[in-house]
Image (cartoon, rainbow, N blue to C red):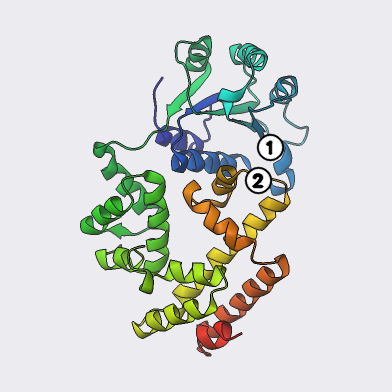
Amino acid sequence: MKATAQLIFNELDSKRTRPIYLIEGEEPFQANEIWNRFKKAFTTDASNAEFQVESWDGEGLDAPRLLESLNTLSGLFDAPGSKRLIVLHHGEKVSTYGRELLGNYLKDPSPDTCFVIFMLKFDRRKPWAKLIETHGLAVSIIEPYAKDWPRWKSYFESITGKTIEAEAWQTLLDQSQRKLSLVAQEMERVSLWAHEKPTITLKDVRMVSPYNEDADPFQWAHDIGSKQKLAGLLKYFRMNSAGENDIKLLAILVRHLRQLQECREILASGEKNPKLIAAKVGVPPFFINRILDQATQWTDPELRVAIQRLSRCDHQLKVGYGSLFENFMMG
């Protein structure tokens, strides 16, 4: 019954999904990747997304309503063979009564529904285990073992479209303490920094290292996010003197301000749990408080205006007019 996330991805790519998937573990990067891949596979029509995908939480779950949703047939205008995706987060928090109801569903799952359950821990001795083995697939998501890292190197090379030098990869692992979610965060940063280069080198990794804050473009973006204009200007001048590309810096800053914008939208929806906000924004949980603090320093109109100005600045830079300093930072 034990399998890997890659098997799920292969089944989604081939459009051969099972009625039930159980994802066990608390490694955040793999959990987020699996959730996003399921959403992408099932959200084929944006106008009908609310019907195609549902998300439930095990804490305080209304089990009868979930059961009703699981058994809902495909819509009249759906394509033949189409399925709905229903995801249950925090499955370990479902009440005993709720587990009994869901246990009955697992005995005879609907062929029109793909039911995905995320749980921190799963007792494989329980009756659920046999039912999932019969009708679906269970996957454990844990931190990689030493023998697994070469496969993860290949994975990140495939999603970034870049080759990673062996020394650069080893440095990334060391700086990230071999925590997959931190490796993923650093890979996103260094890939964005490398821009159109086909290879990520040790120099690229060191340029975005948190131990090199004076020349760290991501720390510079945090200075702008914290409205520390002088610190941001000083870092910009250091990076500019070193020959750093304004278009790269602009892309990093736009990404950061959009994260702040997304945080404000999530907070406005009523969500207050930092871990859940971190998962939605796509940053490690230990990092989210810094982002939230910056988000509260901005108003929604201020962020919209800043992102609009950066969009205009992007156009001006690409036609050879001015610099990031002139077109944005002096505003």
Looking at the image, which residue sits at the far left?
167
Q: For label 2, count other residues whose C-alpha is less than 10 Å away and answer few (under 14), some (14-19) or many (20+).
A: few
1 and 2 marks in contact (CB < 8 Å) = no
> x and y percent of residue 79 in the render?
69, 36
Position of the N terminus by quadrant? top left
Looking at the rendered structure, the kind of residue marked 1 is: Gln
Looking at the image, which residue sits at the far right?
76
Q: Quadrant of residue 213?
A: bottom left
Q: What residue is drawn where x is 46% and y is 34%?
A: 26
| Mark 2 residue element | loop
Q: Is residue 159 above or below residue 244?
A: above
Residue 235 shows up from this direction: yes
Distance of mark 1 from mark 2, alpha carbons?
A: 27 Å
Position of the C terminus by quadrant? bottom right
Residue 111 vs residue 69: left or right? left
Q: What residue is drawn where x is 37% and y is 44%?
A: 180
> x and y percent of residue 163 in the render?
29, 58
Q: Mark 1 = which residue?
A: 52
> x and y percent of residue 25 in the render?
45, 30
Q: Which marked residue is nearer to the observer: mark 1 or mark 2?
A: 2
Checking the image for residue 272, the label placed there is 2
Q: Nearer the viewer, residue 43 or 257?
A: 257
